[in-house]
Amino acid sequence: MSAPPYHPVVPANPADADAIVACWWTLMAVHGPIDGRMYETVPDAQRVYREHVRRQIDASKGVVLVAPTPDEQGIKGYLLGGLGQRSKVYAVREVGMIFDVAVHPDHRRQGVGEALVQAALRRFRLRGLSDVQVTWSPENRLAHGFWQKMGFAPLLIEAYRKL
Ligand SMILES: CC(C)(COP(=O)(O)OP(=O)(O)OC[C@H]1O[C@@H](n2cnc3c(N)ncnc32)[C@H](O)[C@@H]1OP(=O)(O)O)[C@@H](O)C(=O)NCCC(=O)NCCS
């Protein structure tokens, strides 16, 4: 039996920001058809997201990881996460947050997403956290299968209605 492919995962640096934005755009392409209104972006969304990525790379609470391509000239995918606070009433107060994960379509279903998430989980554990949260749309078939494979179970339903 052959070993599963190995995908190195490293902390992102500011030079990765454009490649991260390109990957994020493929994530947005999945969400647009799910709800065109709620996922409609502003004209300069890519610039706004690039700045957000750069800030998170510098933030002490940010967890921004990339899986570089073998030639290290690009990335196969990225994960953007951080630390989240729950209400003071809960014993489990601080949790790891995974905000965005996207793998470039050319590299999907080869274990890159799993490598990114496992690397983030290791970092959260090293910070002493016991739990990690992610949000996904049940209509995003890629994400639904993926997060279940990664051991995540739904706890809440986030719902909207038009006013
Ligand atoms: C979700 C995503 C990050 C997974 O990355 P990946 O590198 O393909 O993940 P892995 O190869 O580690 O695991 C793939 C798993 O996802 C699930 N999956 C992927 N495509 C699927 C599909 N078309 N139908 C059902 N499940 C699917 C399966 O569980 C699959 O495991 P398998 O290949 O062993 O069957 C990637 O599909 C992606 O970037 N999607 C677009 C952005 C997105 O939806 N991000 C998540 C937002 S919360």
Image: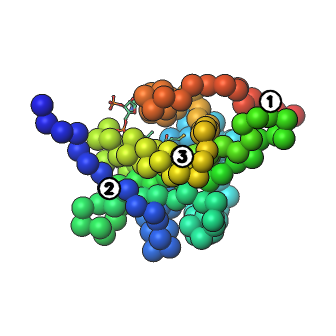
What label does residue 57 carry, if any?
A: none
With respect to residue 73, does 27 lie above or below? above
**Front-most of 77 and 11?**
11
Q: Circle 3 sits on which residue?
A: 125
What label does residue 161 carry, if any?
A: 1
Which quadrant would residue 93 be assigned to in this image? top right
Which quadrant would residue 89 be assigned to in this image? top right
Residue 129 appears at what percent x and percent y?
61, 44
Determine the CA span between mark 2 and mark 1. Answer: 42 Å
| Element type where label 1 sits in the image | loop
Instruction: Identify which amino acid the numbered label 3 is placed on.
Output: Arg
Q: Nearer the viewer, mark 2 or mark 3?
A: 3
Q: In the picture provided, is 31 more to the left or to the right than 148?
A: right
Residue 65 seen from this side:
yes
Question: Are the two marked residues, 3 and 1, in contact with CB atoms closer than 8 angstroms?
Answer: no
Instruction: Identify which amino acid the numbered label 2 is placed on.
Output: Pro
Q: Nearer the viewer, mark 2 or mark 1?
A: 2
Badge 2 or badge 3: first in the primary sequence: 2
What label does residue 8 carry, if any?
A: 2
With respect to residue 65, does 108 lie above or below? above
> Looking at the image, which residue is at 43% across and 28% down?
149
Determine the CA span between mark 2 and mark 3. Answer: 19 Å
Q: Is mark 3 within 8 Å of ligand 1?
A: no
**Front-most of 96 and 81?**
96
Q: In the picture provided, is 112 more to the left or to the right than 34?
A: left
**Front-most of 9 and 24?**
9
